Image (cartoon, rainbow, N blue to C red):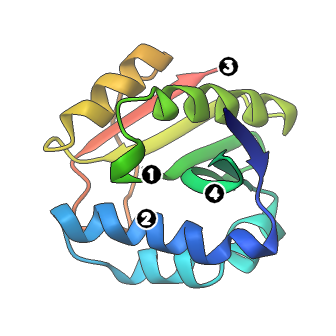
Amino acid sequence: MIEIVNFQTNHAQAFKELNEAWIKQYFEIEESDRKMLNDPQGYILDKGGAILIAELSGKPIGTCALVKMEDRKFELAKMAVSPEARGQKIGWKIGLATIEKAKELGADTIYLETNSVLEPAINLYKKLGFQDAEGYCSPYARCNVQMEMKL
């Protein structure tokens, strides 16, 4: 059974490895990735964000973060599912849980950035309720799609 849990210190390596795997598959690791993946506590959690981990029998198989941007605006970031766990609706489950977590944190808007080559991810975001957005300044060279959801 898949369980969505809050990030604990012992999840740091899985958070990093799950995200590095998909980034390296399609792109290159950028400086902004390194900052977030090497220090999720300082970069995300200590600033008012959250990280959720999807576990199967206690093993981390997926993750998603909420990075606080402004008072009531959060970025959905670093969503990843391990290749062996894909096709089990884990992205959907962790996406819904992340939206609920954003509401708990008082968010009125969730923003995300992605790339047009990641069609399955874009389709998932649309099913979750995200819509196309523009005008945000991205720290990532790879991002050419911006989306947001008003809560």
Q: Which mark lies nearer to you, 4 or 2?
A: 4
Label 4, secondary structure: give it: strand
Determine whether, in the image, residue 150 is placed left or right of residue 144. right
Badge 1 density bin: few <14, some 14–19, many ≥20, Cα 10 Å: many
Residue 140 in sight: no
Place of residue 71 in the rendered image (x, y in percent of width and height, measured from the top left): 78, 47
Q: Which mark lies nearer to you, 3 or 1?
A: 1
Residue 112, relative to residue 61: is it above or below?
Answer: above
Mark number displayed over residue 59: 4
The residue sitting at 81% across, 66% down in the picture is 8
Label 1, secondary structure: give it: strand
Query: Residues under labels 3 and 2: Cα distance?
Result: 26 Å
Sequence-wise first label, 4 or 1: 4
Between residue 126 and residue 55, name the one nearer to us. Answer: 55
Q: Which mark lies nearer to you, 4 or 3?
A: 4
Between residue 47 and residue 124, name the one nearer to us. Answer: 124
Q: Residue furthest left?
A: 117
- Verify CB contact (< 8 Å) between mark 1 and mark 2: yes
The residue tagged 3 is 151
Q: What amino acid type should be assigned to the residue bearing mark 1?
A: Ala
Q: How many marks?
A: 4
Determine whether, in the image, residue 32 is placed left or right of residue 28. right
Residue 81 in sight: yes
Mark number displayed over residue 19: 2
The C terminus: image quadrant: top right
Place of residue 9 in the rendered image (x, y in percent of width and height, measured from the top left): 79, 74
Q: What amino acid type should be assigned to the residue bearing mark 3?
A: Leu
Determine whether, in the image, residue 46 is placed left or right of residue 63. right
Between residue 124 and residue 14, name the one nearer to us. Answer: 14
Mark number displayed over residue 80: 1
The residue sitting at 51% across, 39% down in the picture is 111
Query: Residues under labels 4 and 2: Cα distance?
Result: 15 Å
